[in-house]
Image: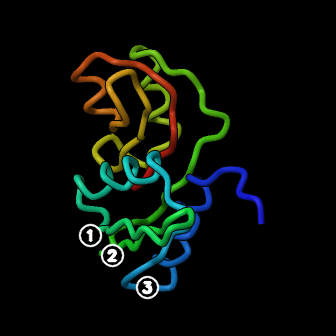
Amino acid sequence: MVHMNVLADALKCINNAEKRAKRQVIIRPASKVIVRFLTVMMRHGYIGEFEVVDDHRAGKIVVNLTGRINKCSVISPRFDINIRDLEKYCTSLLPSRQFGYIVLTTSGGIMDHEEARRKHLGGKILGFFF
């Protein structure tokens, strides 16, 4: 099977496992973008620890779930966002101002929208979770 969007497949696996109340999910194939996205989710407490397993193929990631994710999804195509347009995307994608995060890829790395606003960086939108 050819994976067109690896990040979308990974987030769909996490979403489906959360709906079925699983404690763990295996994501294959692994990529740097998925690892950075999961790091942002782990930093905010939406998932537990995760481990990248090198199986001498494409690799896989074992993610421990905490049951906090309501929805996580990819925004495709990856729209360019400058710092002034960030609030518009927050209101359209997230259910509340204090709830959820938009993940951006910027020149400073992959980070959530609050960190991008603090560092005054714009970039491309990857996805969101809440």
Question: Of residues 22 and 10, which is closer to you in this image?
Answer: 10
Query: Which residue is rendered at x = 23% and y = 61% of the image?
Result: 45
**Dot 2, how many residues are within 10 Å of its Cα: few (below 14), some (14-19), or many (20+)?**
some
Numbered circle sitting on residue 48: 1
Identify whether 115 is placed above or below 65: above
In the rendering, at what x and y percent does residue 59 appear?
50, 65
Q: Quadrant of residue 67?
A: bottom left
- What number is the disc on residue 39? none
Mark 3 closeness class: few <14, some 14–19, many ≥20 residues within 10 Å: few
Q: Residue at x 41, y 19 (%)?
A: 122
Residue situated in front as seen by the camera: 35 or 73: 35
Under tag 2, what secondary structure? strand
The residue that mark 3 highlights is: 21
Q: Residue at x 50, y 21 (%)?
A: 81
Identify the image quadrant of residue 22: bottom left
Task: Report the colour scheme.
Answer: rainbow
Mark 2 residue type: Asn
The structure residue drawn at horizontal position 48% and vertical position 76%, both measured from the top left corner, is: 26
Tag 2–tag 1 contact (CB < 8 Å): yes
User: Tag 3: residue type?
Assistant: Ala
Mark 3: which secondary structure?
Answer: loop
Of callouts 2 and 1, which one flags the residue occurring earlier in the amino acid sequence?
1
106 relative to 58 in the view: left or right: left
Q: Is residue 13 left or right of residue 99?
A: right
Look at mark 2 in the image and give the residue it sits on: 64
CB contact under 8 Å: marks 3 and 2: no
- In the image, taking residue 77 as reference, residue 110 lies left or right, namely left
Residue at mark 3 to residue at mark 1: CA–CA distance? 14 Å
Where in the figure is residue 96, as x and y percent of width and height? 37, 46
Residue type, mark 1 in image: Gly
